[in-house]
Image: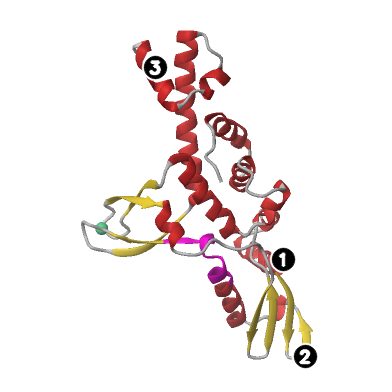
Amino acid sequence: MRALKASELLRIWDEGQTCSAADRALQLLATIGVTADPRQLATLTIGQRDAYLLQLRQYTFGDVMQARTLCPHCKGPLEFALPVSQLLAAHAMPGPPCWHDLDFEEWHLRFRLPNTEDLFYIAGVGDVNAQREELLARCITDVRRGEKETGIWEMTNEVIRLVVDKMENLDPYAEINLKLSCPECGADWDALFDILGYLDREISMYARRLLREVDVLARAYGWCEADILALSSRRRNAYIGMCGV
Ligand SMILES: [Zn+2]
């Protein structure tokens, strides 16, 4: 794991304008070489992917993320600091993708955890309910009831709930749940934290700032974009200070 360079962030922001969020996540991880073979990235579980994105955020922009939301009770604004180290301390880093078993009463299921390939596939499938069914069909390979081999269409709601719960427990970074409290009215609530959405916004703001810096320095000194991006942020700012901007 390493920090993304300014030139890499600008390229990802530029190329990512026409990609899906899932594509951008893979681009980020491919750039820093999370796996030896980039094709393996799409087979990482969503929780593994997001744990790597948390690390990437920590290396590139620092540990503390600033977040804001609205209290669902009094609608007051809530701003809070969210250290990546705290989120990563909550669970062990996920291991490589593998198969899991679920045994419940006469049911036996073999399943794997959802990954980015699954997200790409179900994006083209009907509504949310159809996508959920397709996701389960892709992730569950064996369904047996007693001695009889059957399929996911025979699974009861209770068995579906159990396997979905087990998937969530086995891949805790797939849904990062925050416990929030409102200092104004005292309300407590749970909120999902989307690291990919957060990084998207952060990279977008950073890229726009970089473009302004390149614009100022290119006009003042005649340097090309690549040379300006190769400077450290501190040196870019020092030169901008000398331009009187
Ligand atoms: Zn409140």
Tell me the quadrant of ligand 1: bottom left
Residue 118 at least partly seen: yes
Which residue type carries mark 3?
A: Ile
Q: Earlier in the sequence, mark 1 or mark 3?
A: 1
The alpha-carbon separation of the residues under discs 1 and 3 comes to: 53 Å
Tag shown at residue 24:
none
10 Å crowding of disc 2: few (<14), some (14-19), many (20+)? few
Residue range of the region highlighted in magenta in the rendering: 167-177
CA neighbours of label 1 inside 10 A, class few (<14), some (14 to 19), many (20+): some
- For residue 237, side relative to residue 36 (left or right): left
Q: Earlier in the sequence, mark 2 or mark 3?
A: 2
Nearest the viewer among 46 and 56 is 56
Q: Secondary structure at mark 2?
A: loop
Between 119 and 127, the residue placed more toward the observer is: 119
Quickly name the residue at label 1. 138
Would you name the residue on which mark 2 appears? Answer: 147
Q: Quadrant of the C terminus?
A: top left
**Quarter-wise, where is residue 15 in the image?**
top right
Q: Is residue 176 magenta?
A: yes
Q: Of tags 2 and 3, which is closer to the observer?
A: 3
* 130 relative to 171 in the view: left or right: right
Position of 180 relative to 232 (above/below): below
Q: Amino acid at mark 1?
A: Arg
Looking at the rendered structure, the secondary structure element under dot 3 is helix
User: What is the number of the mark on residue 240?
Assistant: 3
As displayed, is residue 145 above or below residue 223? below
Spot occupied by residue 53 in the image (x, y as percentages of width and height): 53, 49
* C-alpha separation, residue under disc 2 versus residue under disc 3: 74 Å
Element at label 1: helix
